[in-house]
Image (cartoon, helix red, strand yellow):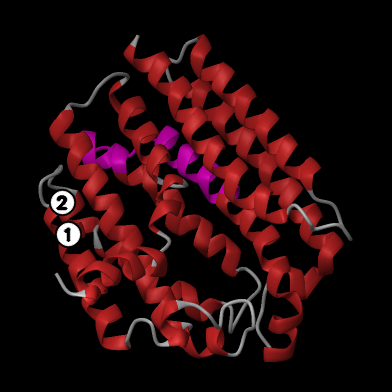
């Protein structure tokens, strides 16, 4: 086996940050479980998993391709696979094509309605990288892209889109947008120098913290609203309380002027939030 056969998959996984799938995938499962108030079956869950992996790989691959020149000029991202030459543009394009194929194969195994809806997330993925060149609202677009996880899983299982599904999607939108506001602080000076747009560039560090706090309060409110519309039990509400507590802890890790623990807040706590909430939803719907 050649060295490239061993290292290339590892580089692809690093390119798209495969481990960060943990942010959105649990919420897709949440949508699937709540859509039927129980277990939707192994085939549905399996195809939803493959669709999510394909969609997220496509989204990250497109993001890296479109932003390659910007990444090369940013000291924080210059070492990424495309700017550094570890992966060629052609190889990244092949990865995107394979990811799109995986996504489409999975989609066509689910409810027939999603066979007509699949272009929507793909359009969101393509447009998102360009938005930072235009508007500081780009964080909300990213949130909407991941917010489709519970919505898409819900309709993939049932063929229906009740308001509770959209409410769950709205909660994920605000959750992702809120922590992406924090993430934008890493590149504040670079974005200013490049003329790029972000919440941090528009409102400064304190405005970024205020925006993230407001969005994460909205997350808890929307999860509670969805619970009121569904036949949920105590475990779901304990999950909402757990999300609120974890978000509070996340915000306690960083403050204006002190971003030393921002990595811990962004990566660790957010991964825990999605998995913990899924655990409580699973308890509520399966037991």
Is residue 152 shown left or right of residue 246? left
> Residue drawn at (50%, 37%), measured in percent from left and top?
274
Q: Position of residue 175 (x, y in %)?
A: 59, 46
One can see residue 52 in this view: yes
Q: Position of residue 122 (x, y in %)?
A: 31, 67
Q: Which residues are magenta?
A: 153-175
As drawn, the label of residue 102 is 1
Q: Position of residue 266 (x, y in %)?
A: 63, 51
Residue 171 painted magenta: yes
> Residue drawn at (36%, 72%), measured in percent from left and top?
61
232 w.r.t. 77: above or below: above
Number of labelled discs? 2
One can see residue 124 in this view: no
Is residue 37 shown left or right of residue 163? left
> Which residue was labeled with disc 2?
106
Is residue 198 shown left or right of residue 120? right
- Label 1 element class: helix
């Amino acid at each position: 086996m050649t060295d490239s056969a061993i290292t290339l998959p590892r580089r692809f996984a690093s390119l798209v940050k495969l481990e960060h799938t943990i942010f959105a995938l649990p919420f897709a499962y949440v949508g699937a479980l709540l859509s039927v108030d129980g277990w939707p079956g192994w085939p549905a869950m399996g195809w939803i998993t493959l669709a999510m992996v394909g969609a997220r790989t496509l989204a990250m691959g497109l993001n890296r391709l479109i932003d390659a020149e910007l990444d090369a000029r940013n000291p924080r991202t210059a070492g990424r696979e495309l700017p550094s030459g570890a992966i060629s543009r052609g190889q990244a394009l092949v990865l995107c094509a394979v990811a799109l194929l995986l996504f489409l194969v999975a989609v066509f195994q689910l409810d027939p309605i999603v066979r007509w809806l699949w272009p929507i997330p793909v359009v969101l993925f393509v447009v998102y990288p360009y938005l930072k060149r235009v508007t500081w609202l780009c964080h909300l677009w990213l949130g909407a892209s991941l917010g489709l996880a519970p919505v898409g899983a819900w309709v993939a299982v049932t063929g229906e889109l009740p308001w509770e599904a959209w409410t769950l999607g709205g909660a994920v939108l605000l959750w992702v947008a809120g922590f992406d506001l924090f993430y934008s602080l890493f590149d504040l000076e670079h974005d200013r120098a490049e003329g790029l747009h972000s919440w941090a560039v528009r409102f400064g560090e304190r405005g970024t913290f205020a925006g993230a706090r407001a969005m994460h309060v909205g997350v808890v409110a929307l999860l509670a609203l969805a619970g009121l519309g569904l036949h949920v039990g105590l475990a779901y509400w304990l999950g909402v309380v757990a999300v609120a507590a974890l978000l509070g802890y996340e915000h306690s890790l960083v403050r204006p002027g002190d971003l030393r623990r921002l990595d811990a807040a962004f990566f660790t706590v957010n991964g825990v939030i999605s998995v913990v909430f899924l655990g409580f939803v699973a308890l509520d719907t399966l037991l």
